[in-house]
Amino acid sequence: MTELCDRTAEELQGLLASGEVGAVEIAESSLARIEAVDEKTKSFLEVTGDLALEQARQVDERRAKGQGLWAVAGIPLALKDVLCTKGITTTCGSKILESYVPPYDCTAWSRLRYGGGVLVGKTNCDEFAMGSSTENSAYFPTRNPWNLETVPGGSSGGSAAAVAAGEAVWALGTDTGGSVRQPASLCGIVGFKPTYGLVSRYGLIAFASSLDHVSTFSRTVRDGAALLSGIAGKDPMDATSLPTEPRDYTAGLADGIKGLRIGVVREWLGEGVEPGVRSAVEASIERLAGLGAEIGEVALPHTDYALSAYYLIAPAECSSNLARYDGVRYGHRAEGATDVVDLNMRTRGEGFGDEVKRRIILGTYSLSAGYYDAYYGQAQKVRTLVIKDFNEAYERFDLLLGPTSPTTAFRLGEKTDDPLSMYLADIFTIPADLAGVPAISVPCGVDEKGLPIGLQLMGKHLDESTVLRAANTFEKDLGFSQRPPLVEEVAA
Amino acid sequence: MPVEIDVDHVARLARLALTDEERERFREQLALILEHAERVREVAAADVEPTAHPVPQKNVFRDDEPGECLTQEEALANAPEAEDGRFKVPKVIEAE
């Protein structure tokens, strides 16, 4: 039996439009699922049940009056807890913001709320979005609905687990080095990172401003496109937001991929990739060829250095962005400080967790006198070369293809003592963040342990349509319909 | 090339109090991370322009019109300590 919360947004929109079900029923279904499984998955830092029901009631009132509904209306949504929500605590998974209640909404949520969005809660994440497993949350780790002994990936692991487990129908996360695509891959759902600047970052609490992308989680490509349509477009509150008009990204999804040129990134199917992941990606290439795509091979030579460049650029931006947590205007303040500098130092020492401290130190170091040119400056030049690799590849190809993650979900605790091995989880997702190009992770099978595998497709700047069309064509043909065992249990 | 970060110095620059245990642990971990990050120096890039933003834009302005903004009360609502409509901090300057 399929419960309402296990349906796609597309199906729910149909049911709402025909009057078969109401938004309140749908919200109740999601909230009941949260009640049933969240003590196991720990996806949420806060469940906003009353708000969800109130917003759903408003949607039902509009329906009763015969007023039209936006595509996002009445669909249960979860938001990563780095996205500001007016009047609702927003912690970034950090103790330093434990009691922070934003006085404004981020643009993405503001647009969805206006369109009748139904917020079921704020999801867990690695502290300030720094991590690849959600184990760096200052509160608790989130678990993967496919196997509760494994991580959901990260940093947006709570949003990914929530969508995979039916606690929300779709969700927003943020992708700075892969923090949406990698957890989507590990949780068997779709994660889509649009072009840098397509979605406003206003109200997204900054980690690394030149890399942060508000991105979507959904169970189908079509739903991801619909959710993106609700949040994309120019925002005067974000100077890096691109001058684009709102549009319907679900248009043309079914147009097929005949003649589409797809370049397989050669280096990404070699050493360090689990055999199960490699064979699923290779089978996907065959499938895409069968669907009419023209497959070729492509090299992105500088992506070999992308991880190194990323771990200089992202910490540098983080050390600068996180300077604002000083114990003065908001957040935690240490007791017993003797002067302002002592107050700043103690507040930050008490408020930040290990990974955030490591990155602040690394970033401060690489920006400090005598090291700037050798580290940060050089990393920015390597970033230029990574972008050049992409541009050259796109002269021959419409899309690039590879695995999303070198592995499927790993066990809790497996990498927590070894930061570098954790960083390697993002090796295939970081390049698209450095280049700012749109990239999607779509499920392409399971490994021998029954854990999901993600296929990554990357497109040209502002060509989300081609990425979404190819992913949709692939998804429909594959018909990946497996659900996490946890969902099978509760829905039985 | 082994890299050693002067963790004490950098933590002071970052206004970050560390325990002795953290200092030792971070010193070891950061050396390993930096050894990997250092690989960017292998790339010949002397004549390459640095990239600060993946999709650069220039001169982004919006109309200079007064809009809604936070009230003083809202702006202070999250402050750990406030007084008379201001943020309150410990003494900054020593009296003579």
Image: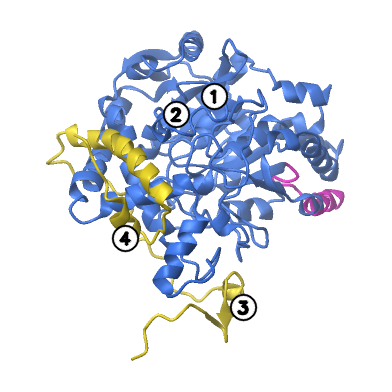
* Residue contact between numbered discs 2 and 1, judged by CB atoms under 8 Å: yes
Q: What range is drawn magenta here? A: A54-75
- The residue singled out by tag 3 in the image is B73
Q: Nearer the viewer, mark 4 or mark 3?
A: 4
Q: Secondary structure at mark 4?
A: helix
Is A130 left, or right, of A480 in this rendering?
Answer: left
**Residue at point 35%, 22% (across, down):** A397
- Between marks 2 and 1, how big is the CA–CA gap? 10 Å
Q: Chain of mark 1?
A: A
Mark found first going from the N terminus, 4 or 3: 4
The residue at the far front in this view is B20
Q: Judge whether residue A67 is colored magenta.
A: yes
Between B38 and A161, the residue placed more toward the observer is: B38
Specify whether B1 is left or right of A389: left
Question: Can you tell which of label 4 and label 2 is closer to the viewer?
Answer: 4
Looking at the image, which is closer to me, A64 or A24?
A24
SS label for mark 3: helix
Q: CA distance from mark 1 to mark 3?
A: 47 Å
Question: Label 3: few (<14), some or many (≥20) within 10 Å?
Answer: few
The hue in which chain B appears in the rendered picture of the protein: yellow
Tag 1 secondary structure = loop
Q: Quadrant of residue B35?
A: top left
> Mark 4, residues whose alpha carbon is within 10 Å: few (<14), some, or many (≥20)?
some
- Under mark 4, the amino acid is Leu
Look at mark 1 in the image and give the residue it sits on.
A410
Q: Colour of chain A?
A: blue
| Marking on residue B13 | 4
Chain of the residue displaying label 4:
B
